[in-house]
Image (tube, helix red, strand yellow):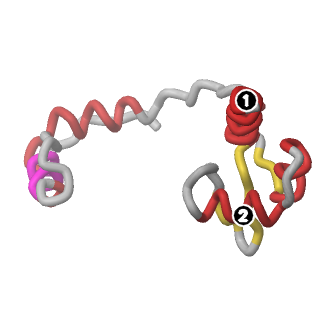
Amino acid sequence: MKVKAIPASTLTAIAALLSPYAPDASPTAIVEALQGHDRKPVAADPAARRMLSLKEAGRAVGISEWTIRRMILDGRVQGRKVGSQWRVPLAAIEALAGANAVEA
């Protein structure tokens, strides 16, 4: 999306509306943010984006899926619920496996 010239009065009004939520939102910052929106996101490492089911995550580190679920709920492992199923980032499981190797 190309940013066209936005009238100064419009930018000032937008900044005023955003000020309770983003105190640093100035007309200049808004224009810079819109221009930055044009850039394509940098492709992240596919392994970093890969998500595992609880069963796959548990199998990868040799513990039950219920243990992985408890670890997510108490904050020891990063995870998120997608619909009705839990997903765990592969990077979090790799970190867990590395931590378990150090403890052993």
Secondary structure type for disc 2? helix
Residue 69, disc: 2
Other-residue count near label 1 (Cα within 10 Å), few / some / many at <14 / 14–19 / ≥20: few
Report x, y in % for residue 72: 64, 58
Q: Is residue 36 visible?
A: yes
Report x, y in % for residue 7: 15, 43
Specify whether 23 is left or right of 94. Answer: left
Q: What residue type is disc 1 on?
A: Gly
Rendered residue at 68%/33% (across/down):
99
Rendered residue at 47%/38% (across/down):
1
- Whether 87 is drawn above or below 51: the answer is below
Secondary structure type for disc 1? helix
User: Where is mark 1, residue-wise?
Assistant: 98
Alpha carbons under labels 1 and 2: distance apart = 19 Å
- Whether 41 is drawn above or below 22: the answer is above
* Quadrant occupied by the C terminus: top right
Specify whether residue 58 is painted magenta. no
Upstream in sequence: badge 1 or badge 2: 2
Magenta residues span: 10-16
Which of the 4 quarters of the picture holds residue 54? bottom right
Q: Is residue 46 visible?
A: no
Rendered residue at 66%/57% (across/down):
71
Q: What residue type is disc 2 on?
A: Arg
Specify whether 71 is left or right of 56. Answer: left
Specify whether 66 is left or right of 5. Answer: right
Specify whether residue 11 is painted magenta. yes
Residue that lies at the very extreme toward the bottom in this rendered image: 84
